[in-house]
Image (cartoon, rainbow, N blue to C red):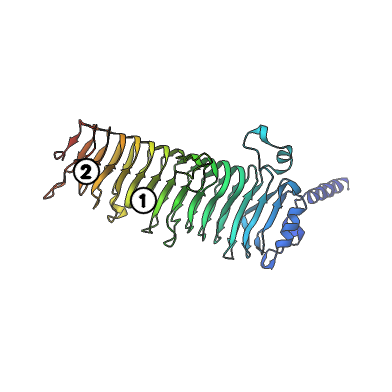
Amino acid sequence: MRALCVLLMFAGSAFAGQEKTVRDFGAAGDGKTDDTAAIQKAVDSGIGGIRFPKGVYLISKPVVVDLDKVGFTSFVSDGTCQIVMAGAGPAFRFVGTHTNGNASPTTFKPNVWERQRTPMIDGVEIVGDHPEAVGIEASGTMQITITRCSIRKCLHGVHLVNRNRNVLIANCHIYNNRGIGVFYDEVNLHQSNIVGSHISYCEGGGIVTHGGDIRNIQIGTCDIESNMSSNTSPTANILIDCSTSPAGAAEVEISGCTIQHNSKSPDSANIRIIGRGKANAKGVQHQWGHITITGNVMSDVMVNLHLAGCRDVTFTGNTLCGGFKHNLLIEDCTHVVFGANVLDRNPPYGNDSINATVFRNCSDCTITGLHVSGVHTAEAGVVIEDCARFNFTGCTILDCENVGLIARNMKNSRISDCLIRDDRKIAKRAPSIKIIGGSGNQIIDNLISDGAN
């Protein structure tokens, strides 16, 4: 008898300790009932961990998480929960009050740590069923963490607005959205990491920053592809656009990703960075940058890498093919270093790409170890145009249809120790190197198949 009482006591304790779910607040999860009020009630109750059992939860307006009011809050499922957003705006809107401090611990108000830090969304699928439905929106948050989520058929997947700090997005599928996958929208945001995620088929771009004041973006080990619509121009799988902000975006690292594919959409790019910002109050127009791009595989777009108005960029250890216009288009940039990268024509990926490399109106750049092969129809495999203090050394340019390298109006620069050859059996071979205008240059110790012109 005593043993039975002990067993019942433990059973009662376990039952009493079971965590509540949205079903306890009236959510049906049948895909037909509007569960907005029930889920909002669960949030406003302050229980913190909002759990979703298996089901389809229809909502018609944003579920708002006022972090300072309700305290620490997370939405948690195991991948069997689907949220269908049938109204305009975000399915989940997180609102915090970290709107003045930076990421330094000394700038935080006590209530941020005591009530707001690290809101989480884990294991939830969000599906848009309205033209203006958005997956997740964050404003004023500290350490928002989005993991193992699927977001599709929305306007934007993750929408970062106003001001946030320390954003982490990991192991997510952000797929087939009408707008942007992860959207830094005129936001003041320092410290964000996007890792191990699949971001694809979002018509307005994969990862996009517009304006704002953005620092410390790390994008790593993701598959990012086909994030461009033929009706949206220009955009990119990764687009960093500083043109509308005097603060701009800087301190960016993109590494270990596959970034590819949008056939021949106009002005498509795998990575496009527009670094020259809007003039600030003192009339200064900064070239934003401080960027490292390394260890990525890129292919199948109009331009694999487009840099415009950038400063302090390192591009090394990448493999590129299938640039329908350009593999590299580098314009109005300074203090750019290109190390060992492969820019090839890989036969299994088709032969209808041009794969040109162009450096235009750039200064103070070092290009070394670049391997360029099989550029078709362009005037040259590599064009260096209106550039100054340009060090192009130790590179290989092979079997291009026209000139191997053209230097046009280049000043105070050096082309040295390069292998520039076309050894194909063809009737007429173009010059390996062609120098047009310019002054103060040194062209020395290159191994070429035909005389320079």
Quarter of the view holding residue 396:
top left
* Residue at 51% across, 55% down: 180
User: Which secondary structure, mark 1?
Assistant: strand
135 relative to 73 in the view: left or right: left
Relative to 257, does residue 351 appear above or below in the rendering?
below
Q: CA distance from mark 1 to mark 2?
A: 19 Å
* N-term mark: 1 or 2: 1
Pick the residue in front: 357 or 58. Answer: 357
Q: Position of residue 402 (x, y in %)?
A: 20, 48
Q: Position of residue 245 (x, y in %)?
A: 52, 46
Q: How many residues crowd mark 1 within 10 Å: few (<14), some (14–19), many (20+)?
A: many
What amino acid type should be assigned to the residue bearing mark 2? Gly
User: Which secondary structure, mark 2?
Assistant: strand
Q: Position of residue 184 (x, y in %)?
A: 54, 49
Q: How many residues crowd mark 2 within 10 Å: few (<14), some (14–19), many (20+)?
A: many
* Residue at 20% across, 33% down: 446
**Residue 221 in view (yes/no):** yes
**Residue 51 in view (yes/no):** no
In the picture, the disc for residue 404 is 2
* Residue at 72% across, 45% down: 72
**Count the marks: how many?**
2
Where, quadrant-wise, is the C terminus in this rendering? top left
In the rendered image, the residue lying farthest to the left is: 427
In the rendered image, the residue lying farthest to the right is: 1
Q: Disc 1, disc 2: CB below 8 Å?
A: no
What amino acid type should be assigned to the residue bearing mark 1? Val
Relative to 149, does residue 88 appear above or below in the rendering?
below
Q: Position of residue 181 (x, y in %)?
A: 52, 54
Would you name the residue on which mark 1 appears?
Answer: 303
Pick the residue in front: 358 or 137. Answer: 358
In the rendered image, the residue lying farthest to the front is: 282
